[in-house]
Amino acid sequence: MMKRPFFGIATPKLKYDVIEDVQPEPVTVQPKQRVTLFIEKAYDRADKALIKKGAAVVRGQRLQLFDEDPAAYAICPVSGVISEISPFIGMMEKQMTAVVIDTESDREDDRDTAFKEVSGTPSIEDAARFLGRLPGKPDFTQFTDADRMVKTIAVLGADQDLQSITGQYIIKTGISSVKTGIDILRKITGVQNIVLVVAQHQVQVAGTAAAGVRSVGAHYPSAHPEMIIRHLLAEQAEQGQIAFLTAEAVAGIGAAYNTGELPLEKQITVAKKDGTRQLVTAPVGTHAADILDAVNEQIENGDRLIMGGPMTGDAVYSLEHPVEPDTEAIMVQDKETIVEGTDTPCTNCGECVRICPANIPVNELVRLLDAGEYEQAAEQAALFSCIECGLCAYVCESRIPIFQFIRLAKHAVKRMRAAEEANA
């Protein structure tokens, strides 16, 4: 919801969507012919790969790419045969490997038992080995990094982007699994202070999870981790590092250890062109085309498909793009409503500066980025203080794609600095 003041001095207010009291059951989607999994590692040594084209795989099987890199893996969500393994370049030149699995021979009773054999004695090592690619994509490296001193775990039950209600649905329907996951996290990480962060209307149900409860405001981006640290967990941040996990990830951890089987289905909010929403349950790797077909959403030439929400999501070029473990929403924009970016220069109206939650001089930052002065932007205009909420691009009167410029600049600076360190 958008509220604009009569006078332009005050900033506009974007409100998070709230899940209805009576929410229809999610639509269950099964892949029609194949799924695609992304492994976060470049496919540069095919002869050394542990997985091969033509190999049969089963549900829950751990697909590790190379022997020397145990962190580069995916969890197979279906039974079938690997039909393709190929390099894939993701956002900001991220080097990955795409694994396509044909599902014609998929059977529910074909399941890998490797995790079940170790689930009786939970450990951080086994959690990182098997659970790091669960729906919600829990990051266990936060607890194994010797340079981090994690003192607090924040479980995010509030949705971070607009139009999504995925996190709220998990809190509403899966709070018992969240509680079990919290108990497991205390045991395997040793971190006792766990805080469940939810929307204001879900504080009561969250109180049954045996964790501290904090509520975020109704206005975007109050559910962003940086804003949560600033306004809700500042005291905890002073005492040590804060690790963030989504409620879906924690619920998956709880379900995995409770049943001995890896949860493979992802909860997703589908935002349609007409403004309505539909919750969907689909295996990780399901193609967007299968999901949109299940909810009767037709894509026309010129429409835009976004993986994520309207503020921070990424537009993708293919309906074959899969649901990833951290995909919270799929959004379709009608071609008639798309506001295209322009190359119009900044008019210095100040709207971006007034709305920025990180208090960055965005107008100065934009000028430096437009000139390609990325290092100066980092040193003089607080480039890396940006929390990437997208509000600056939303209010820009010149329709400059500031959000995308900032992400590109951060990537470029990191790449330049990495090259300098390598040369040194």
Image (cartoon, grey):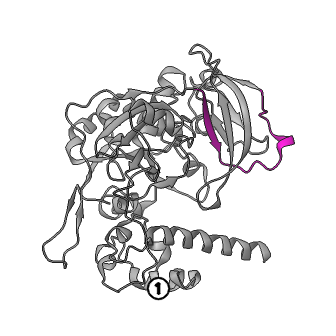
Q: Residue placed at 50% from the left, 39% from the top? A: 288
Q: Residues within 10 Å of mark 1 (few under 14, many from 20)?
A: some
Q: Is residue 210 visible?
A: no
Q: Quadrant of the C terminus?
A: bottom right
Give residue 20's position: percent from left, percent from top. 21, 37
Q: Residue furthest left?
A: 6
The magenta-colored residue range is 33-54
Q: Residue placed at 52% from the left, 80% from the top? A: 369
Q: Residue placed at 39% from the left, 62% from the top? A: 226
Q: Would residue 174 be counted in the magenta stretch?
A: no
Residue 130 location, quadrant: top right
**Three-letter amino acid code at disc 1?**
Arg
Q: How many marks?
A: 1
Q: 31 left or right of 226? A: right
Give residue 255's position: percent from left, percent from top. 46, 27
Residue 410 location, quadrant: bottom right
Q: Is residue 339 above or below residue 309?
A: below
Q: Is residue 6 above or below residue 98?
A: below
Q: 381 left or right of 320? A: left
Q: Report the residue marked by disc 1.
A: 367
Residue nearest the viewer, comparing 171 with 195: 171
Give residue 264's position: percent from left, percent from top. 52, 29
Give residue 71's position: percent from left, percent from top. 67, 44
Q: Would residue 52 be counted in the magenta stretch?
A: yes
Q: Is residue 3 above or below residue 162?
A: below
Q: Quadrant of the N terminus?
A: bottom left
Q: Residue furthest top?
A: 109
